[in-house]
Amino acid sequence: MLRFPPTEPPGRRGGTTLFYHDFDPVAFRLGPLAVRWYGLAYLAGFAAAYGVLRRAVRRGRLPLEPQAVGDLVTWLALGLVLGARAGYVLFYNLPYFAAHPLRAFAFWEGGMSFHGGLAGVGLAAWLFARRHSLGLLSISDVLALAAPFGLLFGRLANFVNGELYGRVTSLPWGVVFPAGGPLPRHPSQLYEALLQGPILWAWVAWVSRRFPGRTGAATAAFLGGYGVLRILVELVREPDPQLGFLLGPLTMGQLLSAVLVAAGLWLWQRARPSP
């Protein structure tokens, strides 16, 4: 929950209302097993992807047998988890993992990268498409409508975990995160949940309806849209402490997202109406 400290009354201090992050990252326990909100967010994202893919199959947008949708989601889940971890190792903490290579397999300690997960999903979708004689873009255009749901759940879980918080702010909705020191910070996880969830979905859905026969248009809209929104949010998000700023004021997230924007523009130029 967001609370005021029990020893101090609610109010404003220095012009800023202080909200204190006090969420439990564990959703519930089953004996010795602790079920965390982050794990539930992954499950909810995969369930959403399954529903979107099944709907696309029923409507004839994806030439795939209904029973194969579960196999596709399994491939995508493996690609996402492995890619997200590999991306974190390579992009965000390579010196540490080079010195401690076995720690790269310690998934339970956290450390996942969206950009790495995206690459893993892309590779899994490509392998699945080859196996089933499908076009990669026919799958990715559908996944572009499913991904914002997973991003929404994932960013909300980041907020519950009190991680990936923003920079110090004097705005009235600033939140004091236990790991972020005594000063209020931007709840950048909530910004990302809104921007990368419903707003990104609405953008991709509009492009899909506006260009229904243009294969690759939805994928391009997702890549470019996510890249732009992530670059903007990074302006108020605290950089990773082990990296700080790169190339002047830029962060690793902004640099990787700039690549996505370029990829989206390139794909948009190459996208052609379906025959």
Image (cartoon, helix red, strand yellow):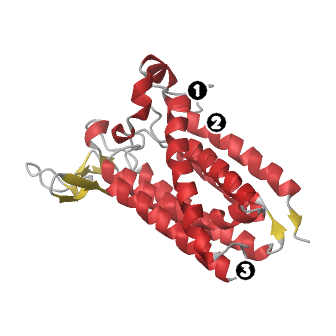
Q: Earlier in the sequence, mark 2 or mark 3?
A: 3
- Vertically, is 139 above or below 57? above
Disc number lying in front (2 or 3): 3
Amino acid on which disc 2 is placed: Leu
Pointers 1 and 2 in contact (C-beta within 8 Å): yes
Indicate the position of residue 68 as horizontal and vertical percent values. 61, 69
Query: Which residue is rendered at x = 75% and y = 65% of the image?
Result: 138
> Which quarter of the image is occupied by the N terminus?
bottom left
Q: Earlier in the sequence, mark 1 or mark 2?
A: 1
Number of residues whose C-alpha sits closer than 10 Å to that of mark 2, classed few (under 14), some (14–19) or many (20 or more): some
Q: Is residue 172 visible?
A: no
- Vertically, is 239 above or below 72? above
Secondary structure of the residue carrying numbered label 3: loop
Q: Earlier in the sequence, mark 3 or mark 1?
A: 3
Q: Which residue is mark 2?
A: 255
Q: Is residue 38 visible?
A: yes
Amino acid on which disc 3 is placed: Gly
Q: Nearer the viewer, residue 113 or 78?
A: 78
- Vertically, is 55 above or below 42? below
Q: Which residue is mark 3?
A: 60
Q: Which residue is mark 1?
A: 246
Amino acid on which disc 1 is placed: Leu
Q: Which circle marks residue 270 in the picture?
A: none
Q: Nearer the viewer, residue 133 or 192?
A: 133
